[in-house]
Amino acid sequence: MKPSGRIYIAGHRGLVGSAIHRELTRLGYTNLITRTRAELDLLDTAAVNQFFASEKPQHVVLAAAKVGGILANNDYPADFIRDNLILQTNIIEASYRNQIDRLLFLGSSCIYPKLAPQPMPESSLLTGPLEPTNRPYALAKIAGIEMCWSYNRQYGTHYLAAMPTNLYGPNDNFDLNTSHVLPALIRKTADAIKAGKQELTVWGTGNPRRELLYSDDLAAACVFLLNLDEARYNSLLIADAPPLINIGTGEDVTIRELAETVAHVLGFQGSLVFDTTKPDGTPRKLMDVARLHSLGWHHTTSLEQGIALTWKAVRATF
Ligand SMILES: NC(=O)c1ccc[n+]([C@@H]2O[C@H](COP(=O)([O-])OP(=O)(O)OC[C@H]3O[C@@H](n4cnc5c(N)ncnc54)[C@H](OP(=O)(O)O)[C@@H]3O)[C@@H](O)[C@H]2O)c1
């Protein structure tokens, strides 16, 4: 992508989209195209078509999605499958009609089967049943991958689907009712410090293992992929396998280690108590990132550094 290239970032205010926007700005890209939901509702097919026809982006990052935690996915399954199918179809189709060559479609590790081998390789897609709680969301994402693959085969486009592991960073959701494990730990630890508590309760045994990637590292990986030379980029788009690549660190930590790192970074002096009456969830979720590593990309932000950067960015709002 040339620094003057017209790059549309769908979902530029979200955790992922905002990190990609920051990274492209940092690298000197000057023609970034963005629209808030109020300016362009991506569920509105006619509006999306009109937007593409008038703005004529050259590259597209599809980081807009209806995203939520277990509760939201459970309560609104129809919204999750419908909105994601419509939104991604609108953008993929408009991209094709407007001769967009490279499009990066963001999904997540929930596309892989619940009992996929650990670490999970790209080849485990559609090899077993999905985790039921977010199946509608995951199936919409799988349909998006299949669309990228189908458009590539039929229309000769170069659409790539990137599946990040669990992400965290400054624009994360820190609401205890709906947040993921790391922002929830940051919120709980900050609250415990504020209240002068000597004990901090963490759900579960602390034994499950999780992989976490700092959002700026994800953004760097996305830009790296979009900027790959033709030979390496096209090596990801072979005809007989989906155009799919995992993005992660390839390393995981226990929830206990995660809680201890958060406590250390935020300066919590008390002790951690593990409430074993609460469920643990999946024992392990780790991406196989051999494909990404073989292209030459590795993450650079350690977990401790990433938590410190996140805390620095959000502490004033707590
Ligand atoms: N967060 C993670 O840990 C994680 C991990 C792996 C993969 N991912 C993937 O990355 C992608 C983005 O996730 P995220 O965490 O960045 O989500 P997010 O923070 O909720 O951001 C999603 C963005 O999409 C926009 N959007 C949703 N519906 C829209 C609509 N109808 N019209 C216009 N804009 C709309 C939202 O706009 P508003 O701000 O106006 O709502 C928001 O800016 C998803 O595909 C997700 O699966 C995320």
Image (cartoon, grey):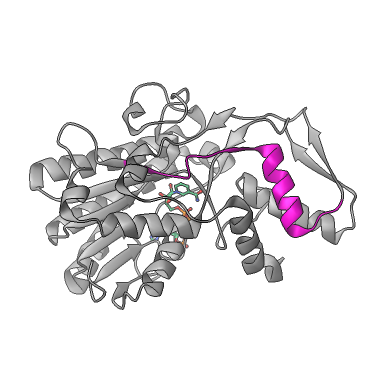
Examine the structure image and report whether residue 137 is included in the region drawn in magenta. Answer: no
**In the rendered picture of this protein, how many numbered marks are placed on residues?**
0
- Taking 226 as reference, is 163 left or right? right
- Taking 282 as reference, is 140 left or right? left
Q: Position of residue 7 (x, y in %)?
A: 27, 68
Residue 152, picture quadrant: top left
Task: Specify whether residue 63 is in view.
Answer: no
Q: Residue furthest left?
A: 155
Q: Quadrant of ligand 1?
A: bottom left
Residue 145, picture quadrant: top left
- Taking 131 as reference, is 208 left or right? right
- Front residue of 312/279: it is 312
- Front residue of 34/39: it is 34
Residue at screen point 9% across, 48% down = 156
Examine the structure image and report whether residue 262 is included in the region drawn in magenta. Answer: yes
Question: In the rendered view of the protein, which quadrant contains the N terminus?
Answer: bottom left
Q: Position of residue 243 (x, y in %)?
A: 24, 41
Q: Position of residue 138 (x, y in %)?
A: 40, 37
Residue at screen point 79% across, 35% down = 274
- Front residue of 198/257: it is 257
Residue at screen point 38% across, 55% down = 221
Task: Specify whether residue 71 is in view.
Answer: yes
Residue 218, picture quadrant: bottom left
Question: In the rendered view of the protein, which quadrant contains the C terminus?
Answer: bottom right
Magenta range is 245-269
Q: Position of residue 234 (x, y in %)?
A: 17, 47
